[in-house]
Image (tube, helix red, strand yellow):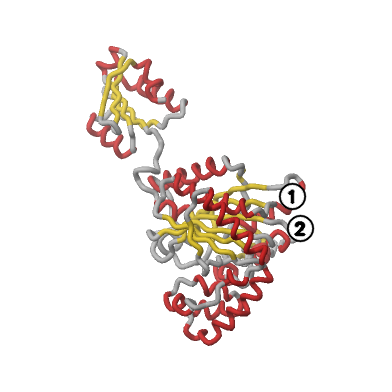
């Protein structure tokens, strides 16, 4: 019997693993420039963490979590998202007593029992950032700008930044009542999921992707009209500084996000290149979550993005910045020198491929192409006797003969 990967999971190898490493490395390097450091949390947590943190009325908790009982009889869940675990770590290790503002980023596997589709899996890899301890609306704009600039840095284009404000708890309670009154006569026309959300989480009806639901909520009351003065001012400053940072955006009044912990600023960066599920990156402010999980009132802001979805959007011409080299050696006399030089170049941080057995020039050049080499070193017996080597540069379509002693300087 052939055993295959479980539905909704995927092996990542070859070019895809290069894309994965590229995205994760650039993200880490870029976020660290903004003062973020990495946090690594366990891949599973107590189930109650997600019930309290995400909200029992959400689709994630009610339908999508991978939950199991361990040998001690404890209910555990594979993490469906990163924020709740980050907040748990923040409280457990009393980070709030060590610093006024905490800036963390993370990446790793998440698990949700969803219908697999393009760029969406049941085990998926996510990169996220969280800032705890700061409520300034300028921070909101700065992090949205950082997210947008990161996507530009990895050459993902044709993006739209969508923002909204969903206010605080009291604002949402007032709006929730108005929304339910609006939806009540339309309930039977909504999709099955929205009929279930109708009372437990009616705001989720607003950003349902089903066309019939989109049509029914066109005339829904607008949440922005229910914001109090402080919430309006906060959102105005966010927009002002997005303008200052040069980020073009649109206000999407139906944008609410799917998790209960969000408040005030929410945002998504979307593309039209991934079908109806076009969200590339999303997040927002969650000022009540730390308190909800047993801590003191602590403002917070963050976002997350799926690595697989980013990989689908990467241009083949841009993602690979490695200066790969392939070593072609011809004749047994050159073999030892070729491997000595290969090891020396690898120790200098250059990625070098090489054949182990003697093969023709044609066969080795074919292998170099498959390896993705940008340059090829060619060492034959004549070159070895003269203390020289040929460097063929595929990117420039040029080749030159240089002294063996100059190879390191030429490649670094």
Q: In which quarter of the image is residue 263?
A: bottom right
- Judge left or right: residue 332 versus residue 134: left
Query: Alpha-carbon neighbours of circle 2 within 10 Å: few (<14), some, or many (≥20)?
Result: few
Residue at 49% x, 86% y: name it. Answer: 188
Is 286 left, or right, of 151 in this rendering?
Answer: right
- Going 73% across and 53% down the picture, which residue do you hit? 92
Residue nearest the observer in this picture, 271 or 344: 271
Q: Residue at x 47, y 76 (%)?
A: 218
**Quadrant in which the N terminus is drawn:** bottom left
Q: Where is residue 77 in the image (x, y as percent from the top left)?
A: 61, 62
Work out whether residue 331 or residue 95 is closer to the camera in this orientation and state it. Answer: 95
C-beta proximity under 8 Å, tags 1 and 2: yes
**In the image, residue 363 lies at what x, y percent?**
24, 34
Label 2 SS: loop
Q: Is residue 204 above or below residue 375?
A: below
Residue count near mark 1 (Cα–Cα under 10 Å), binned few <14, some 14–19, many ≥20: some
Q: Is mark 1 on a helix, strand or loop?
A: helix
Q: Which of marks 1 and 2 is nearer the N terminus?
A: 1
Q: Where is residue 56 in the image (x, y as percent from the top left)?
A: 63, 71
Nearest the viewer among 357 and 163 is 163
Q: Distance between the residues labelled 1 and 2?
A: 9 Å
Quickly name the residue at label 2.
Answer: 296
Can residue 132 be seen? Answer: yes
Q: Residue at label 1? A: 96
Residue 354 pos. (x, y %): 35, 30
What label sits on residue 334 in the rendered view? none
The part of the image, by quadrant, that contains residue 79 is bottom right
């Amino acid at each position: 019997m052939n055993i295959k990967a479980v539905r909704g999971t995927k092996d990542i190898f070859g070019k895809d693993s290069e894309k994965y490493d590229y995205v994760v490395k650039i993200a880490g390097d870029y976020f660290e420039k903004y003062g973020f450091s990495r946090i690594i949390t366990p891949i599973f947590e107590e189930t109650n963490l997600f019930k309290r943190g995400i909200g029992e009325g959400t689709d994630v908790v009610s339908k999508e979590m991978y939950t199991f009982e361990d040998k001690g009889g404890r209910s555990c869940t594979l993490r469906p998202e990163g924020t709740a675990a980050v907040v748990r770590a923040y409280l457990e290790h009393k980070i709030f007593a060590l610093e006024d503002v905490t800036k963390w980023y993370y990446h790793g596997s998440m698990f949700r029992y969803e219908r697999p589709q393009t760029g969406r899996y049941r085990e998926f890899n996510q990169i996220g950032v969280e800032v705890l301890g700061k409520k300034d609306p300028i921070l909101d704009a700065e992090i949205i700008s950082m997210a947008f600039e990161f996507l530009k840095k990895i050459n993902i284009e044709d993006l739209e930044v969508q923002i909204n404000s969903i206010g605080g708890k009291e604002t949402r309670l007032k709006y929730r009542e108005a929304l339910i009154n609006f939806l009540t006569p339309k309930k039977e026309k909504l999709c099955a999921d929205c009929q279930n959300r109708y009372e437990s989480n009616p705001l989720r009806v607003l950003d349902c992707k089903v066309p019939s639901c989109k049509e029914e909520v066109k005339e829904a009351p607008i949440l922005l009209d229910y914001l109090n003065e402080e919430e309006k001012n906060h959102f105005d400053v966010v927009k002002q500084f997005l303008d200052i940072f040069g980020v073009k955006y649109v206000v999407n009044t139906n944008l609410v996000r799917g998790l209960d912990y969000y408040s005030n600023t929410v945002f998504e960066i979307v593309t039209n290149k991934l079908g109806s599920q076009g969200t590339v990156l999303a997040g927002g402010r969650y000022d009540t979550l730390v308190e909800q999980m047993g801590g003191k009132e602590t403002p917070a802001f963050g976002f997350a993005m799926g690595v697989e979805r980013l990989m689908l959007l990467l241009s083949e011409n841009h993602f690979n910045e490695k200066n790969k080299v392939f070593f072609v050696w011809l004749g047994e006399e050159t073999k030892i020198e070729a491997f000595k030089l290969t090891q020396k170049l690898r120790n200098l941080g250059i990625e070098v491929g090489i054949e182990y057995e003697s093969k023709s020039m044609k066969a080795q050049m074919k292998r170099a192409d498959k390896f993705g080499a940008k340059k090829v070193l060619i060492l034959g017996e004549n070159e070895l006797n003269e203390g020289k080597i040929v460097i063929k540069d595929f990117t420039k379509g040029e080749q030159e003969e240089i002294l063996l002693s100059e190879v390191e300087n030429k490649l670094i």
